[in-house]
Image (cartoon, rainbow, N blue to C red):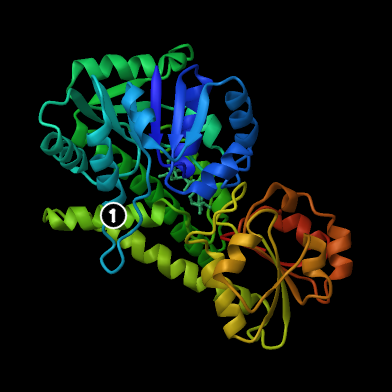
Amino acid sequence: MRVAMIGTGYVGLVSGACFADFGHVVTCVDKDASKIDRLHKNIMPIYEPGLDALVEQNVREERLFFTTDAKEAIADADAVFIAVGTPSRRGDGHADLSYVYAAAEEIAELIDGFTMIVTKSTVPVGTGDEVEEIIRKKRPDADFAVVSNPEFLREGAAIKDFKIPDRVVVGTDSERARELMRELYRPLFLNETPILFTARRTSELIKYAANAFLAVKITFINEMAELCEAVGANVQEVSRGIGLDGRIGNKFLNAGPGYGGSCFPKDTLALTKTANDHNTPVRIVDTVVEVNAARKKAMAGKVIKAMGGDVSGKTIGVLGLAFKQNTDDMRDAPSLDIIPALIEAGAIIKAFDPEAMEEAAKLMDGLNYVENAYEAVDGADAMVILTEWDQFRALDLDRIKESLKSDIVVDLRNIYSPEDMAKRGFEYTSIGRPS
Ligand code: UGA
């Protein structure tokens, strides 16, 4: 099949490369000429493990193309995917749909023959209806179907999530579109991926409900971690103890400094806005948004407390800045709350992240970015782990101990064992576990 992918952001690029790898002919379109230029040179706009190799191979085998010119790509396509950004609208937290609607206007002018217009961007319920109206108004005679096909990709694991998904959700009432979507995802049937066909509005809501539920799960375990700290229990064992119950499941029960990233914060907020607009508030999600924001803010206090209540003039070696491992994404990262608060309290920060320092430097100044973990802790009064990169799980702890001025380690991702750290003579603080 021929696919046009509008938008070469995170979702568009990963989905485009994976569809090409399935054997389809994919043209990725973006208005940003320098991005397209770089993609022609196989320079990725984001860090995502395995993406450069996947793009390189599919370009070489002539299944994947990049262009700034939407015309040909759309006219030839059986499916045109909308994968543009839907950021939080400034001021009210609603999803900003201006890019989606602009794409719809453009697509309307260019489609030729029966075409599926598929929304991959995360869009509020009813957006598909709007897209359909925009196209119908411009091209009353056009033969098309608007389909919702949300993505469930995690940054850092996006290729695997695309190729071995838990499910594929397709929202449409057009039988013809259903057939084409089946064809598009056919390679997944080999591993028996469930494909769930629903009405379009249901599919749009499934995406928000999934992200909100995961945010609830994380926030729940974070509050349990607080309680564990108060009563002397261990949150990792609580997670395991409840997660073994098949009804609860063991995933997304790692307590941490609060969720961040480009999706959960934006999507939980957008869901609460939609729900309020329809006079059916989702109070659990409202509370989760509030609790998570407060948690990220409270984490600096936890570090300060572990350092004896005063960090003025003290040096802190920070390991990890990205909102999670395997990404350079800094959007809503807990580090953006924690580091400025520590600087405000008088601390000197030396920070290292394997991929996110360039992005971090655009958002935070007043700290020193260094070349590796050991340089960050050299002569520091404490080591603070903010992101769970694999390379931080296997540090030479003897070397760390020698490099640090004092023995304080604050681990906001629970990657070390309290017993082991105590045995090695560290003053170790983690999340929801007795030290
Ligand atoms: C999330 C969803 O997991 C994807 O399914 C979805 O497609 C994506 O949003 C999206 O809407 O595009 P992502 O934001 O890449 O993916 O990252 P996650 O791995 O879900 O992590 C989100 C945040 O939750 C991170 O800050 C992470 O550190 C935190 N988290 C996750 C925890 O604190 N504990 C956990 O147990 C899991």
Viewer-closest of 303 and 24: 24
Viewer-closest of 38 and 356: 38
Query: At 53% across and 68% down in the image, what residue appears?
Result: 336
Q: Amino acid at mark 1?
A: Ala
Query: How many numbered markers are drawn?
Result: 1
Give the percent coordinates (x, y) of residue 144: 20, 25
Residues packed near mark 1 inside 10 Å, few (<14), some (14 to 19) or many (20 plus): many
Query: At 60% across and 19% down in the image, what residue appears?
Result: 61
> Which residue is under mark 1?
95
Q: Residue 5 appears in which quarter of the rendering?
A: top left
Q: Residue 117 appears in which quarter of the rendering?
A: top left
Q: Is residue 56 above or below residue 375?
A: above
Q: Quadrant of the C terminus?
A: bottom right
Give the percent coordinates (x, y) of residue 340: 56, 77
Q: Is residue 102 left or right of residue 56?
A: left
Q: Is residue 296 above or below residue 155?
A: below
Does ligand 1 reach within 8 Å of label 1's beta carbon? no
What element does badge 1 sit on?
loop
Give the percent coordinates (x, y) of residue 138: 14, 38
Query: At 61% across and 68% down in the image, what residue appears?
Result: 361
Residue 164 makes an appearance in the image: no
Viewer-closest of 138 and 168: 138
Residue lying furthest top: 190
Q: Quadrant of the N terminus?
A: top left
Q: Is residue 200 above or below residue 406?
A: above
Q: Is residue 32 left or right of residue 90?
A: right
Q: Residue 125 appears in which quarter of the rendering?
A: top left
Residue 388 makes an appearance in the image: yes
Give the percent coordinates (x, y) of residue 197: 26, 23
